[in-house]
Image (cartoon, rainbow, N blue to C red):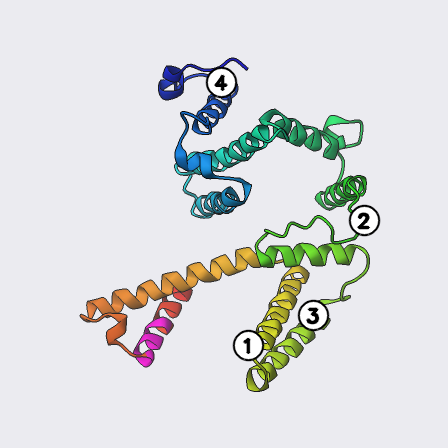
Amino acid sequence: MDQITSEALIGETGGGAERQIARLIEIMARLRHPETGCPWDLEQDFDTIAPYTLEEAHEVADAIARKAWDELPGELGDLLFQAVYHARMAEEAGLFDFADVARTIANKMVARHPHVFGDESREKSAEQQTQDWERIKAAERAGQAQRRTLDGVALALPALTRAVKLQNRAARVGFDWPSTDEVVAKVAEEARELVEARESLGPAEIEEEFGDLLFVMANLARHLKVDPEAALRAANAKFTRRFAYIEDQLAARGKAPSDSDLAEMDALWNAAKAAEKGA
């Protein structure tokens, strides 16, 4: 790839995707130049950049959830830059480069869509395509010496999402409750065990029992075909919205939440809830 001049790096806004990706890769190379690069960027490694990668992915999801389409190009760009950053550090270490990253995902997508790029029929349901996708991924894991059922479920996933993925893997080999009723009963059992732990055990045991309850709640979400992360995000948004109503109503009375009490705020919460349901 031809090196892009400093003037083009700074001022270029035209050109297609290929040109702009080349520009971004060159910018990253300049930032990591051992003599003229940015001191902060030169200090970074895979471990220090990984948290930023997760943060940028969440910011993309946040923009989508808010339907902030004007913000989405910038958030996607921030996430793309993370891939460029990791690829540059890998290239410096002689591991791989950005072309390898792009080639790998392109090859993977072609291999995983034989009904588009191969000779398989496209006349499949979404459920059948999902089953085919999982079958192909299982074959890929076997080729990578991932022999155990739960191998390859990323550790850095949000805990609820990882719980669902672990349970889905186990369910594919028959380790699953046959109906939602058994899961609901397990939720009640784990809740009782948490109460018992709170009354008679220490912090470590309480944390363990709380984790067990969250894990089975994730399983209940899976059986109900609910995304637990999406459900919790919606609950967070609802809480934020209703608490803002409490603050607004208190402000109209010349008060702040710290000047109020639980009874007054709970009454305002119920008013916010009633207003939402009546809307």
Q: CA distance from mark 1 to mark 2?
A: 36 Å
Which numbered disc flags the more N-terminal residue, 1 or 2? 2
Stretch in magenta: 262-269
Q: Considering depth in this image, is 272 or 177 the residue closer to the camera?
A: 177
Rendering coords of residue 202 (x, y %): 57, 80
- Using residue 173 as the reference point, say whether residue 45 is left or right of it: left
* Residue 227 visible in image: no
Q: Amino acid at mark 4?
A: Arg
Residue 215 drawn in magenta: no
Mark 1 belongs to which amino acid? Answer: Pro
Earlier-in-chain disc, 4 versus 1: 4
Which circle, 3 or 4, is nearer the viewer? 4
Task: Compare residues 74 and 278 and report the one nearer the observer.
Answer: 74
Give the CA separation, mark 4 to mark 1.
56 Å
Helix, strand or loop status at disc 2:
loop
**Residue at the disc numbered 3:** 183
- 3D distance between C-alphas at marks 3 and 4: 53 Å
- Residue 31: image x %, image y %? 43, 28
> To which quarter of the image does residue 224 belong?
bottom right
Q: For this rendering, which residue is in front, 92 or 163?
A: 92
Q: What kind of element bears circle 4?
A: helix
Q: Which residue is mark 4?
A: 19
| Residue depth check, mark 4 versus mark 1: number of the one nearer the observer | 1
The residue at which mark 2 appears reads as: 147
